[in-house]
Amino acid sequence: MLNPTVEQALNDQIQKEFHSAYIYLSMAAYFEAENLPGSANWMHQQASEEQAHALKIFEFIHDRGGRVVLQAIDAPPATFASPLAVFQASYAHEQKVTKSIHDLYALAVKEGDYPTQIMLQWFIDEQVEEEKTASAIVAQLQMVGDSPAALFMIDRQLAARSGA
């Protein structure tokens, strides 16, 4: 049986994961409007990944005999200053998600909920990858500055990302 305190925190995390997907869809819309289809593709893939994360927690709650209670999702930002600003926001958001996962793990430890700790280890590993990828893209965009040709090349690279 799932501890009620942990269950509530997991439900909160589902909301955060779906909100993340919403944020990435908004970023994809920005890139579509800016005629950067590769970057839009990258953000669409990221949104799908975040939805999968939410569903992983959703199923875990049910597997443990808990109840999922979906929560409202706030509107994401709709405008961004530049492609670099988008990826900087993405990186900052991933850092926020990492903190949330770490807090959730600490709660599971405090409550002695070993199955939740094990499940969350996957998310901890995933967040290392998420932050590394976002920070690498930020670094590339910072390196190329305002060069349209370099931005075009990075956009083509980002177009290669496909769903898992």
Image (tube, helix red, strand yellow):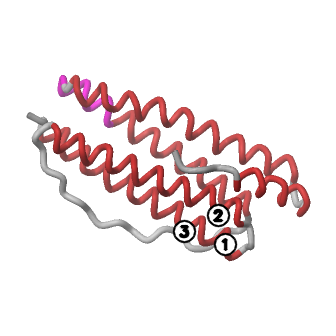
Residue found 62% across the figure and 73% down from its top: 79
Check if residue 27 falls in the magenta segment.
no
Q: Which mark is residue 154?
A: none
Give percent across and percent down for residue 29: 60, 72
Q: Amino acid at mark 2?
A: Ala
Q: Amino acid at mark 3?
A: Ser
Disc 3 to disc 2, how far (Cα)? 10 Å
Callout 2: SS: helix
Judge depth for marks 3 and 2 and give the one in front: 2
| Residue under numbered circle 2 | 40
Give percent across and percent down for residue 86: 65, 60
Check if residue 109 falls in the magenta segment.
yes
Highlighted range, magenta: 104-112
| Residue under numbered circle 1 | 32
Residue found 26% across the figure and 48% down from its top: 58
Callout 3: SS: helix
Q: Is residue 8 left or right of residue 40?
A: left
Q: Is residue 57 left or right of residue 152?
A: left
